Amino acid sequence: MKIPSFRRRAAVVAAVAVSAVLALSGCGGPGGSNAGKTFTVWWFESPDSAMGVASAQVLKDFEAAHPGVKVKFEQKSFDQIQQSGTMILNSSSAPDVLEYAKGSATAGLAAKSGLLTDLTDVASKKGWDKKMAPSVAAVGHYDQRGVLGEGPLYGVPNYGEFVGVYYNKDMFAKYGVKVPTTLAGLESAMDAFVAKGVTPLTMSGAEYGANHLWYELALSQADRSWVDNFQLFKGPVNFNDKAWTFAAQTLVDWGKKGYFSQDSTGIKATDMLNAFTSGTSPMMVSGSWFDGQLKTGVKNFQWGEFQFPGNKLTAGSGGNIWVVPSKSENKDLAYDFINRTLETSNQNLLGNSGGVPVAADPAAVTDTHSRAAATTFKTLAGSDGLAYYPDWPAPGYYDQQVKALQGLLTGALTVKEFNDTISKPYEDYASQLK
């Protein structure tokens, strides 16, 4: 059959367009070089979190761009990656790309063990380094010792996060409590709630909630050099100094004053979140990764967030990172997946879903809480106020801190014994870096 000339031109244009699309997408079409391959992706953000929503859209877009590729996604938990990450990366079951816990104890250990792909050149070629502020990208860089902040790029964060104090505006109004701006003001606010028979803080002692509160209290007495010595091994660390001792003693005191429940040591992070979203707890010290769940989970009251009162430094950083295992057999596809997480449309989705984007169009982020969180994060990053997280320096430190904090809060450990307990694994690892 003879094809009319205008339709032949259309056919030629369409063929050129398809070829161009396949070239841009790494020839992922049915006849492309990636046809028939199986591409495996893991992440641990929950489906209802902003990061989970944005990652699901990336996966959908990726599948559409690579119709000849069989995509396998597996939902993991943070604890699975935290506890078994290097073992997984060193096995034949390692995925092609995965979300990995940032920090020297996790990503740094994997990087120095040769388990992660150096992404420095790819980041430069694809412009990722232009989209991430240096203070945000720091969580992806690790030196030959596995210490974060410098060296090649091994991971890419596509969101930011920081710890603050979430509060129930309705409960503050009901009991006539003002938002505190100092640590003394925070204690006065908690006294006011206790006086009315209300436990002010919901806290998780079985997971990271207690770690964050303890670290915020230490940071209230610290400066940048204190943080750099602890996190980046730039100088000696005295775990019985003023900051660490103040943090541990204040936790003990706050427990005795009824600022948080005595059974907090057995509460997990999701239970802490549920206590806040149910409207029974006026405050929760936790991170911006909960913003999406608060946005959808809080139904009957107004909520807001303020920075830990009086602190110039706060726990926070670029978010957890996308990494490509050295054993990945589909690295070009992995690079394309990561690239899509930083595209403006996906960053805007992340922001409007309650997350803190790193490369969104500010005008396109219309969610009130997200815009406020993005502004706070930008201020913290710009003022050198991000102090990372207390479990980052040493492998296995998170579990050791959780256990020690439980001992402190139950009275099994004195403040001195607690400080000595958290000192030992840190000093043991630090000695290996010399």
Image: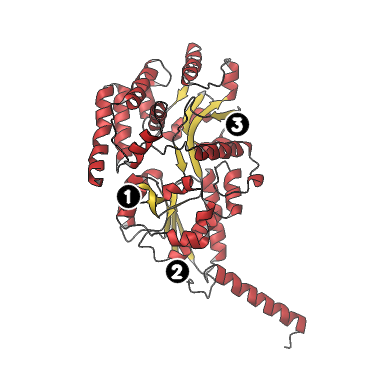
The residue positioned 57% from the left and 47% from the top of the image is 350
Whether the residues at callouts 3 and 1 have beta carbons within 8 Å, the answer is: no
Q: Earlier in the sequence, mark 3 or mark 2?
A: 2
- How far across and down, in percent of the image, does residue 230 sit? 33, 37
Q: Is residue 72 above or below residue 372?
A: below
Q: Element type at marker 2?
A: loop
How is the structure coloured here?
Answer: secondary structure
The quadrant of the rendering that contains the N terminus is bottom right
The disc label shown at residue 129, or none: none
Q: Amino acid under label 3?
A: Lys
The residue positioned 53% from the left and 66% from the top of the image is 66
Residue that carries the numbered disc 3 in the rendered image = 299
Q: Nearer the viewer, mark 2 or mark 1?
A: 1
Whether the residues at callouts 3 and 2 have beta carbons within 8 Å, the answer is: no
| CA distance separating discs 3 and 2 | 44 Å
| CA distance separating discs 3 and 1 | 44 Å
Q: Nearer the viewer, mark 3 or mark 1?
A: 1
- How far across and down, in percent of the image, does residue 423 sit? 26, 33
Q: Earlier in the sequence, mark 3 or mark 1?
A: 1
- How far across and down, in percent of the image, does residue 222 sit? 39, 29
Tell me if residue 196 can be seen.
Answer: yes
The residue furthest top is: 195
| CA distance separating discs 2 and 1 | 32 Å
- How far across and down, in percent of the image, does residue 364 sit? 66, 47
Q: Is residue 129 above or below residue 162?
A: below
Residue sitting nearer the eye, 36 or 414: 414
The disc label shown at residue 37, or none: 2
Residue sitting nearer the eye, 121 or 43: 121
Q: Amino acid under label 1?
A: Gly
Q: Element type at marker 1?
A: loop
Q: Element type at marker 3?
A: loop
Residue that carries the numbered disc 1 in the rendered image = 146
